[in-house]
Image (tube, rainbow, N blue to C red):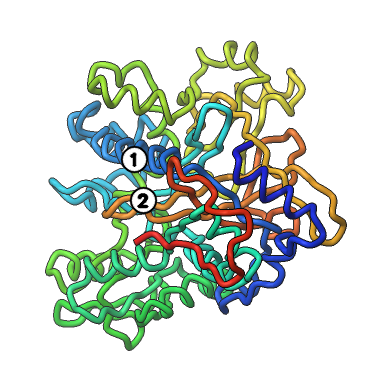
Amino acid sequence: MDEVTTRYVELCRADSSGLSAAVAEAELPAALRDARLLARPLFADEPGLRSAADDLLALFDVLVTLPDRLFDGDIERYWAALGGEPRLAPLLRRHVRAGRPADRFGRADLYRDEHGFALLEFNIAGGVGGFELGELPRSLEAVPAFAAFAERYALRHVRTAERVAATLRAVAPRPSPVVALVFAPGALARYRRPVAPTVAVLEGQGLEVVLGELGDVRGDAGKLFVGTARVDVALRFFTVDDTIGHEDALDAITRAHEKGTAVLWTGLDSALFTNKGALALLSDPRCDAVLSERERRVTERILPWTRLLTAPLVDRCVEERDQMILKPCRGFAGSGVVAGWACPEREWRDTLRSAADGGFVVQRRVVPRPEPVVDPGTGATEDWTPVWGLFVTPDGYGGNAIRAQRATGGDVIGYSTSSETLATVAFTRPAGDRPTGDQPPDSARAVVSP
């Protein structure tokens, strides 16, 4: 446990510190008022976190070149290697933007173990969630007890909404863009409340935001409309599958994108790389011949052993059951994930056999480092297991969003909205900084990174 965390937990255990209640006392913005928050933020050494972010960006740049490096640009062959549905391959090929890589935008989910950060999955899409958690640090800085602690340790943070808004303005064709969150047909009623925090933080950055479904999308004189609103940027909250039967809407978006009157952020081509099978290709031996030495080092450093599950791998995965986890290539929210160590051997073998060559990956287990958290109500200290979500934008690292569950040894965290999954954010501490004093003034404020 690092020095900052150790000291924070010690102070939370002290009745007079005020830190244990800092999250509960923070005046939260509207975007966070329904959030279920962990009782404290997490802390990371800034060079270590930045190094992980740099590795992710380097990995991203390799990931989006895999169709060219391994399959001579043949999207159908690449998609088939990932176990993708054949019916979607022509659609993906038609909408891959020639000569242009996928938009560098998304959220990588990682565990932190004794060696550093390890990548679990890379969500490369405009519809990733968690932007709103970047507002939590500013609320905590207004709590005197936390402000004093932040001043003492020179804590910093990145405000994700600022980075996202800057990205959307940079790609938009007009200086005051209208941003549309576009959903699958029939999905808006279900997702309107979950995306309300995303809407709130984007509007808080001065962006005009509208919501709609693919059925609301139309083109007119080369411009893009969602309902009655002309939009400049469409954030994609729909999948490739959702566009089947709605080709007119997709064509309207594509024509506006090609004319430069609107931007689809991110494009359908991102579906080629958010697929977990792409990570399996990165750590597959066939990649050795096409990666530079530096690229191989980055891959080995940040990505656990990951393979597309084939029949010849089943016996090995059975033998190493305690160290293996099975994931669907296109799954999300923890759906379809099976942990070998939590599964009887016969059941594990049967599960592997039925999944072999069917669009699944196996990944070596990463044992996450637990984080101690003091319950402000009882004073008890419990270990929590966090998943670190690191955002990337075209300008690099874009902040973080963390979800956590009580540590039970299961090591599998989904996206449950129950009380078992809580959210927080991490502050960073610059390298080499020492505490500035034993009793900083109550009015001190944390330093915000530019």
In which quadrant of the rendered image does the N terminus lie?
top right
Where residue 91 sits: x, y (%)? 29, 51
Query: Which residue is rendered at x = 23% and y = 28% of the image?
Result: 71
Query: Which residue is rendered at x = 52% and y = 15% of the image?
Result: 313
As shown in the figure, which amino acid type bears the numbered disc 2? Answer: Tyr
Asked if the residues shown at circle 2 and circle 1 are in contact, with their CB atoms under 8 angstroms apart, the answer is yes
| Circle number at residue 54 | 1
Which residue position holds label 2? Answer: 397
Label 2 – label 1 distance at C-alpha: 8 Å
Residue at the extreme bottom of the image, as rendered: 228
Where residue 89 sits: x, y (%)? 31, 43
Name the secondary structure under disc 1.
Answer: helix
| Circle number at residue 241 | none
Could you say which is closer to the camera, residue 314 or residue 42?
Answer: 42
> How many marks are shown on the rendered structure?
2
**Residue 297 is at least partly visible in this image:** yes
